[in-house]
């Protein structure tokens, strides 16, 4: 397909109120903040965005607000994966109606599935997106389903709109394999953007990118202009951002706490049962984030 996706695509949290409603003002502020720092697009309602537990209405709001805010400024790849195919199909239709640039989807969750069931699931979602580019979300650590190259070949034959993959699986070498298939491959490993680019990835998608977008954009720009010493220096400095996101095993809440401080608008907590930070943990997250320069506007 003609649409090209590449560069720095943060996977941000989904700001919410205590009653579960999406905080539209906070979501717009978050997107605006990242766009000001030069990001090329967003991976909305992924795992850090709590996408798999959003209901149909919440997911539709995220798609609408993201598409409206990013129009003409950054691309929106909307994750629509859900427990049921019917819910994922609704998400794909909402993303199409909202004006998102692409949809992405986890494989079927929880219940063991055959390859045929996975193909049928993806085909239904892709068809519902009505021509939008389709991305596979390869995250076996959480789904227990890995899209290996042989399965990806089946997906390619069955889904004409399949253009790419977010590769978060442990087999880093498959980045090159998928790129050789003609797919636009985003690495889901925020700690390794430069190695992924050298393997054939077109860019990176992960939660740390939403907290330090300027760092990842500068690294990507250095890579594009062939300035490897600068790109390597930036790669070497990434680890603290990734360690921050994974403090206490609560990446979604960590991101909301840090962005709340930077934006001056409450992004809320996580949706149960997603891990939450207690008051002491939030203070420590803010201490570390402040030391890294992430809690003030730049």
Image (cartoon, grey):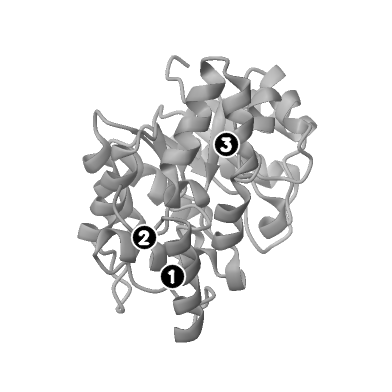
Q: Point out residue 73 in the picture as x, y percentages from the top left corner.
A: 27, 31
Give the SS element for disc 2: loop
Q: Which of these two is toward me, 189 or 134?
A: 189
- Give the mark, 1 or 2, whose residue is nearer the N terminus: 1
Q: Point out residue 114 in the picture as x, y percentages from the top left corner.
A: 75, 48
Q: Point out residue 282 in the picture as x, y percentages from the top left corner.
A: 46, 77
Q: Which mark is residue 27?
A: none
**Pointer 2: what residue?**
295
**Pointer 3: what residue?**
234
Give the SS element for disc 3: helix
Q: Is residue 261 left or right of residue 77?
A: left
Q: Is residue 178 above or below residue 274?
A: above
- For the residues bearing labels 1 and 2, Cβ distance under 8 angstroms: yes
Report, in whole angstroms, how far the alpha carbon at label 1 lies from the one at label 2. 8 Å
Pointer 2 local density, CA inside 10 Å: few below 14, some 14–19, many at least 20: many
- Give the mark, 3 or 1, whose residue is nearer the N terminus: 3
| Among the 4 quarters of the image, the one containing residue 286 | bottom left
**Pointer 1: what residue?**
286
Q: Which of these two is toward me, 60 or 50?
A: 50
Q: Point out residue 207 in the picture as x, y percentages from the top left corner.
A: 51, 52
């Amino acid at each position: 397909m003609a649409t090209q996706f590449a560069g720095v695509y943060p996977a941000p949290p989904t700001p919410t109120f205590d009653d579960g409603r999406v905080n539209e003002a906070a979501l717009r502020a978050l997107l605006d903040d990242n766009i000001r720092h030069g990001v090329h697009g967003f991976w909305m309602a992924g795992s850090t965005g709590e996408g798999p537990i959003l209901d149909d209405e919440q997911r539709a709001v995220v798609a609408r607000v993201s598409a409206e805010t990013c129009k003409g400024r950054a691309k929106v790849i909307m994750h629509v994966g859900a427990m049921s195919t019917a819910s994922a199909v609704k998400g794909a239709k909402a993303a199409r109606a909202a004006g998102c640039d692409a949809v992405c989807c986890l494989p079927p969750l929880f219940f063991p599935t055959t390859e045929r069931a996975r193909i049928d699931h993806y085909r239904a979602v892709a068809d519902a997106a009505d021509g939008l580019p389709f991305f596979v979300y390869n995250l076996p650590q959480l789904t227990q389903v890995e899209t290996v190259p042989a399965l990806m070949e089946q997906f390619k034959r069955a889904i004409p709109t399949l253009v790419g993959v977010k590769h978060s699986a442990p087999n880093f070498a498959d980045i090159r394999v998928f790129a050789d298939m003609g797919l636009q491959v985003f690495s889901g490993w925020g700690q390794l953007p430069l190695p992924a680019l050298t393997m054939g990835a077109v860019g990176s998608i992960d939660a740390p990118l939403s907290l330090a977008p300027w760092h990842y954009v500068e690294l990507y720009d250095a890579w594009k202009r062939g300035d490897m010493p600068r790109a390597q220096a930036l790669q070497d400095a990434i680890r603290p951002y990734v360690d921050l996101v994974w403090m206490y095993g609560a990446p979604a809440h960590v991101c909301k706490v840090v962005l709340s401080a930077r934006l001056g608008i409450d992004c809320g907590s996580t949706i149960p049962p997603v891990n939450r930070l207690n008051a002491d943990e939030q203070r420590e997250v803010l201490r570390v984030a402040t030391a890294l320069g992430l809690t003030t506007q730049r």
